[in-house]
Image (spheres, rainbow, N blue to C red):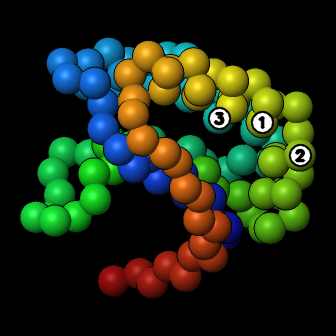
Amino acid sequence: MITRYAMFQGHINDGQTLAFRAAVLNEVLPKWKAFPGVLAVRVCFAEARDDGAPELPMILAISYPDRAAVDAALASPVRAEAKAATEAVLARYFHGHIHHHITEAHDFTM
């Protein structure tokens, strides 16, 4: 499985954390879930971090069966819709930048 992570590094406007989270879940999550080939979408909102760690108020993980599916999703018209919805929410609540990482998972059952 391949997962593309979006790390939202920065901060939410003071007093706007709950509004930011609601906007992400209501306005943007449906777009992320509509990517072709998506297996799972996980939206993680930060609750705490180590001293000195960068502020990441949200981490998005979208999983696909393989790299070809990631590439197809990124080339799809849905991506433009998702990007526009994301940018609209960020403009209201977030100051910072986003960086992406594509990973290959190796799960081990305990």
Residue, x 88% and y 31% (percent of image)? 77
Q: CA distance from mark 3 to mark 2?
A: 14 Å
The picture places residue 81, in percent across and down from the top left corner, at 76, 25
**Three-letter amino acid code of the residue under disc 1:** Arg
The picture places residue 53, in percent across and down from the top left corner, at 22, 64
> Residue 32 falls in which quadrant of the image?
top right
Q: CA distance from mark 3 to mark 1?
A: 8 Å
Pointers 2 and 1 in contact (C-beta within 8 Å): yes
Mark 1, secondary structure of its residue: helix
Residue, x 50% and y 79% (percent of image)? 107
> Residue 80 falls in which quadrant of the image?
top right
Residue, x 55% and y 55% (percent of image)? 99
Instruction: Give the farthest residue toward the left.
Output: 51
Quarter of the picture holding the N terminus: bottom right
Residue position for label 3: 32
Residue position for label 1: 79
Residue 93 vs 52, above or below: the answer is above
**Three-letter amino acid code of the residue under disc 3:** Trp
Residue 110 vs 32, above or below: the answer is below
Viewer-proximal residue among 11 and 78: 11
Q: CA distance from mark 2 to mark 1?
A: 7 Å
> Residue 75 has which mark?
2
Which badge, 3 or 1, comes first in the chain's sequence?
A: 3
| Residue 44 is at least partly visible in this image | no
Task: Classify mark 2: residues with Cα within 10 Å, few (<14), some (14-19) or many (20+).
Answer: few
Pointers 3 and 1 in contact (C-beta within 8 Å): no
**Viewed as shown, does residue 53 lie left or right of 82?**
left
